[in-house]
Image: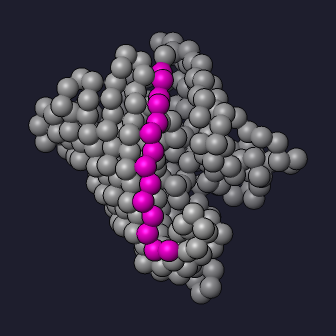
Amino acid sequence: MANLVIGYEGEKVGFVADLVYGPRGEDATFLSTSLRPGGRSNIVNQLYVYWNVSESVKLTIGNFNTFLGYEVISPTVNFNYSTSYLFSYGPFSHTGLKADIALTDDFSLMLAVMNPTDATEYNPTGEYAFGAQSGYADQYLNFLLDDGAYEIDYTGGVKLSEKMFLGINAALYDNGNSGDDKAGFAGVALYPQYSTSETLSFGLRGEYFVETSDFGAIGSGVENSSILAATLTAKIKIGDLTIIPELRLDSSSDDFFADKDLKTQKSLSSFVLAAVYTF
């Protein structure tokens, strides 16, 4: 993924134009493209303006990445290079208006009204989604209500020592339907990370994820399927370049992984060597 971010940060107002190109970026902007007439390729990850109304209130309007979850689209911010199931099931981005309110030095509140989830180009239904976030000392409890569907998400972590950090993400989603149309998921992921020096660090992501019903085309296609995944990542920093070797093991309750002969199986092991350059 190539990622170009252009922005201006003034005392009162500013803007961000965040553009992406490549498979990772296309996956993150998939729905806005499919909902747009003509289905043209979309390279806009974020595009918003903001206004610092006061020292404690900030208004943002436009297209911005989701406030739910531990991981983000850009690999420059995540510790692991591959993404979790909790991240992959979304949401990715929203278009709307949000207000960030600093209640005290430790307490924060965010309220938002937005288009339906991931519909960043225009509103195809005329309905609106509502979001809220309550924060205390870098621990966040997030809520999303979208046309009867809802998601509750906790994102946070604790610094165990100067070199050791433990990140935490847990979420529950329900589409609000019943019978054959009911769909949902739940999961938890832990992110222990250890820095040996400024140039070398190690991290492990352990995740348990379950579809509480059949998620159809965007899920496994198997009702009440579950996944246990472990991802071991090293980060080697060389100036602005970061080399990321990563070993990942996924084990599922059902046969929906494919081997090199395209035969289905319950487990998958993979190795990725990534190079990330920022400037």
* Rendering quarter of residue 61: top right
Model colouring: one colour
Helix, strand or loop for the magenta stretch, by majority? strand
Toward the left, the furthest residue is: 161
Across and down, in percent, residue 60 comes to: 55, 32
Above or below, 126 against 198 in this view is below
Which quadrant is home to the N terminus? top right
Instruction: State the residue in front, 267 or 203.
Output: 267
Across and down, in percent, residue 33 comes to: 75, 47
Above or below, 223 against 166 in this view is below
Identify which residue is drawn at 58% across, 83% down. 178
Toward the top, the furthest residue is: 11
Is residue 90 visible in the rendered image? The answer is yes
Instruction: State the residue in front, 33 or 154.
Output: 33
* Rendering quarter of residue 108: top left
Toward the front, the furthest residue is: 261
Identify which residue is drawn at 53% across, 81% down. 223
Instruction: State the residue in front, 233 or 149.
Output: 233
In the image, is residue 223 part of the stretch drawn in magenta? no
Q: Tell me: 125 left or right of 259.
A: right
Is residue 134 visible in the rendered image? The answer is no
* Rendering quarter of residue 215: bottom right
Segment colored magenta: 265-278
Instruction: State the residue in front, 169 or 250.
Output: 250
Identify which residue is drawn at 47% across, 69% down. 185
Toward the bottom, the furthest residue is: 179
Across and down, in percent, residue 222 comes to: 55, 79
In the image, is residue 273 part of the stretch drawn in magenta? yes
Q: How many marks?
A: 0
Above or below, 248 against 176 in this view is above
